[in-house]
Amino acid sequence: METTAPQEHLEDIENTLSLRDILDIFIFNWKWFVISAIVCLAIGRLYLATQPNIYQRSAVMLVKDDSNTPGASSSRAKGTDALMQLNGVMMGSSVKNEVYILQSHQLMKEVVRQMHLDVYYSYKHRFQRLSLYDVKPFTAVFDSVETTRPYSFVVKVQGNKATISNLYYGGKKLDLTRTIPFGEKIMMPFGGLTLEADEHYLEKFDGEEITVTHSTIEAAAGSYGGALNANELDKQSTLVGITFADSNIQRATDILNAVLDAYRKGIIDDKNRIAESTASFIDKRIAFISKELSEVEGELANFKQRNKLVNIQENARQYLQESSQAKQRSIQLESQIGVVKYLLEELKSTSSTNDLIPSLSGLSDGALQSQITQYNQQLLEFNRLYLKSSDDNPHIQKLQQNLAQTKKAIIASTEAHLSSLNVQLARAKQEEAKLATNITNVPEKEKESLDIARQQTIKETLYTYLLNKREETELQLAITEANIRIVEQPFGSNSPISPRKKIVMLVALLIGIVLPFAFFHLRNLLNMSVRGRKDVETYTTIPVLGEIPHRKEGFNDTEILVGSHKSDSINEAFRMLRFSLNFVQKDARVIMFTSTTPGEGKTFVSRNFAVTLGMTGKKVILVDTDIRKRTQSKLCGSSNKEGLTSYLSGNVDKLDQLIIHESQEYNVDMLPAGITPPNPSELLMSDRLDQLIDELKQHYDYIVVDNVPAQVVADAGIVNRVADVTLYVIREGKIDRRYLPELERLYQEKKFNKLCIIINDSKMEEKRYGYGYGYGRYGYGYGNYGYGYGNHSDKKK
């Protein structure tokens, strides 16, 4: 005996959506798909009509590496970087820093101020609100260039005049309407306002209402900053790509140019700040040394005049020559000590890490000079990053710690260098003192003269050195340039990058297709009733004898719709049902009809099927065994209280007294149910029912038994003992398909004789996917179906 498939397997089969099912959804609901697609495409087109076109402009910039200069300076820079890393000071990627600065809020604020982008002009054109930039009929000039409270108003151009209205200020709409000539100043709640006309475009915008919005610098910078993007083009190079997207091509180009100019100016200002700090330091020292040199020169002149000294004695020339060499070494050392002391005083006098260290190339210690240069570069980088961040940023705090450590290292190196120079000077002094003892014969006053002259030489050397450094600093200020080069000026296509019309319309079309498909598929999944033949074949192995198509409006289950001269779908369906029964059970004479619940059309099918059998010339009798409701008896119009129950109870023995000859044309007679007894089941269980069937077989070719629903009372199972075949009527959309496994159990346990299923009210013309085989015409289609049924029955068994 074959058993029912597991419930999980049935659910998998039920939820499987084949390609044929999908095609059926589209084919038999194509009108809904077309309507949905048209509506969605219209919505997509409306969406595109409301969206402004966005254009993109791009530029490419090369960041030069200052450390790539040839010669010793390059080696010194690389050595300094290595030294800084050993001291725990991390050196970041210069390109990434520049990318960050290009996208910084501070830089965009400078651009907004420079281009007055905080004032925005727009007007309504069809479904869009378009912005105005280079082509506009007027320019709004405000007394207060920057505002802290955003506001907006509408200007209607009327020839040489303008009407101002719809003012929103402080979050409220003010009832204000004023008409003024262009060029005339007017006082508004936010201050003075002048509308300066552009004669070239006044006529073009005549009658247009233009909205002027004055936002804060912060808000405008945030808005435009979101459209700016910078990134490294290649990890192996220092090229930086910059893009800006805007609804106005010219504004996008101008903003990119302004960003590059502001960025270049910031770099130059940073470099000039070092030179200006050095120049200020040199000017102070020159003034101080100049004063000291004047005093020494005056002292020497007075001394020689007072002591009448002209030439050094010839006998001391040899000693003086040696002494001069020693003094020269002392002079050089003292000169260097002076410079180092000045530098050390400057370092210790500035406790803040935000002050630049003067860059003095005259230092004999090259490593110290490189440390000062590296410190100044780090400080400038820190100041640029600090503008975008705050003290709480861990990266800023790390940079501050690195700067403090670097400055301490520079101070320690300076002190060490000063100590080294002092040691060298002490040795030079010792050598000079030794030579001085050899010139004891030199007059004391000449020695004093030499001391004064030595001081003069030291001051002159320092003075000359500082003058040279000042010229170098001035030259640096004159030729300072940014360490970038613009490789590609702003460029781009005149085709918009957004919205992408083809993609939007394609998405709209897909949505238009998916929505109805999802609706029909979801409706099917939520429908738990028996939806057609496929459900029956999925859940059971019971043979499906046939399908009775759906009746149109105006018909009811009480009518006899079949006839010998009719060829509509219902008549063909009953003929195929008759053919299928003959194919399955050729010798069947007693045919019992039942169903699950009332209202499934059991009475209609049995009544019309009896007529279909009678149209072949066979004698047919329709027996109403539903002695509780007596539906069939009521339909035939029987007023006779005598019927089946009379025979079963033994009150009547002659059947001729009970049979009604209902249709002489189709050889169909009727045995009504009779009166309703108090014990229907007991009557049907009596042997009189078997005797009744045997007697009827003697006079009729077919006995059609219209029985009660099988799941309502036990009468169906009782009467089934006399049936040759049981036709189980299932109305499409009536019962829950979860009952089908129970029906399969009854079939497997042979509770009903030769159980077959008839699907009633099948909406086959709608051909819902997977649940009807699409037989739009019943002649040839049902012939194949009869043959296919035989295959189906054989396959199941």
Image: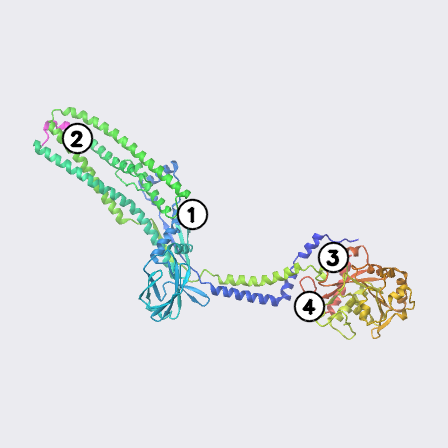
- The answer to whether the residues at label 3 and label 1 have Cβ atoms under 8 Å apart is no
Q: Earlier in the sequence, mark 4 or mark 2?
A: 2
Mark 3 → mark 2, Cα distance in angstroms:
126 Å
Judge the density around disc 4: few (<14), some (14-19), many (≥20) Cα neighbours within 10 Å. some
Give the mark toward the camera: 4 or 1.
4
Say which quarter of the image contains residue 327. top left
Give the mark toward the camera: 3 or 2.
3
- Could you tell whether 13 is left or right of 628 in the image? left
Q: Which segment is the magenta one?
A: 311-327
- Residue drawn at (33%, 36%), measured in percent from left and top? 408
Disc 4 target residue: 765
Q: Earlier in the sequence, mark 3 or mark 2?
A: 2
Q: Earlier in the sequence, mark 4 or mark 3?
A: 3
Residue type at mark 4 is: Glu
- Could you tell whether 200 is left or right of 316 in the image? right
Residue type at mark 2 is: Ser
Judge the density around disc 3: few (<14), some (14-19), many (≥20) Cα neighbours within 10 Å. few
Mark 4 → mark 2, Cα distance in angstroms:
126 Å
Can you give x and y, in whole percent of width and height, for residue 638 in the image?
A: 83, 71
In the rendered structure, find residue 739 and report the number of the disc placed on it.
3
Q: Nearer the viewer, residue 683 or 593?
A: 683
Disc 1 target residue: 235
Disc 2 target residue: 324
Labels in figure, total: 4
Residue 732: in magenta span: no
